[in-house]
Image (cartoon, rainbow, N blue to C red):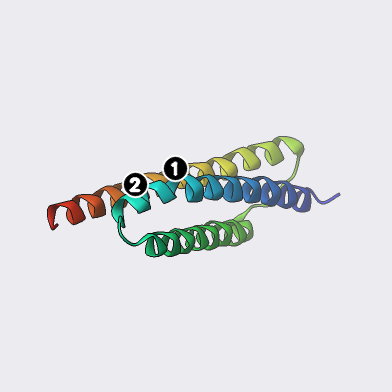
């Protein structure tokens, strides 16, 4: 059996699950922060939240798809496990960085809106 195909399948399933699960948690819990910023306009907060979720999915799943083309040939099961761990770790690290960047953006916008009103 071609180990690259097995590795791609496992990687795609694991990262898709992570991206969709984390995205949904951010979507549900992030709505409260957006409602806090857009106090009088809940529709705008909901629209922005959906837009952020869609952009999040597109960016992360696109990265997963593109990154598959840069993998080396997998020769044995040890290399399979190493590649899965390394590439999944990169995705998890990227999700964390994106989360903190979004939270910094929300804090700045909230600070700006409070200061100007």
Q: Which percent across, then down, holds residue 23?
A: 53, 50
State the residue in front, 3 or 22: 22
Point 50% across, 48% down: residue? 28
Circle 1 SS class: helix
Q: Give coordinates of residue 96: x percent, y percent.
A: 44, 42
Q: Which residue is mark 1?
A: 96
- For disc 2, the neighbor class at 10 Å (few under 14, some 14 to 19, many from 20) is some
Q: Secondary structure at mark 2?
A: helix
Q: Earlier in the sequence, mark 1 or mark 2?
A: 1
**Residue 103: mark in rendering:** 2
| Closer to viewer: mark 1 or mark 2 | 2
- Image coordinates of residue 57 in percent, x first then y, are 54, 58
| Res. 66 image quadrant | bottom right
Q: Residue at x 77, y 53 (%)?
A: 5
User: What whole-number distance in Å separates the C-alpha atoms at marks 1 and 2?
Assistant: 11 Å
- Residue in the image at 20% along x and 56% along y: 113
Measured along the vertical axis of the image, is residue 50 above or below residue 22? below
Residue 3 falls left or right of residue 114: right
**Other-residue count near label 1 (Cα within 10 Å), few / some / many at <14 / 14–19 / ≥20:** few
């Amino acid at each position: 059996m071609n180990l690259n195909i097995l590795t791609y399948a496992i990687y795609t399933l694991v990262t898709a699950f992570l991206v969709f699960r984390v995205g949904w948690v951010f979507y549900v819990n992030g709505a409260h922060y957006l409602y806090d910023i857009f106090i009088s306009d809940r529709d705008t907060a909901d629209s922005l939240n959906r837009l952020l979720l869609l952009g999040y999915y597109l960016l992360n799943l696109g990265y997963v798809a593109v990154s598959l083309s840069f993998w080396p040939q997998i020769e044995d099961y040890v290399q399979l496990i190493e590649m899965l761990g390394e590439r999944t770790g990169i995705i998890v690290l990227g999700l964390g960085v994106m989360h903190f960047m979004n939270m910094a953006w929300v804090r700045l916008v909230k600070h700006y809106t409070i200061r100007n009103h």
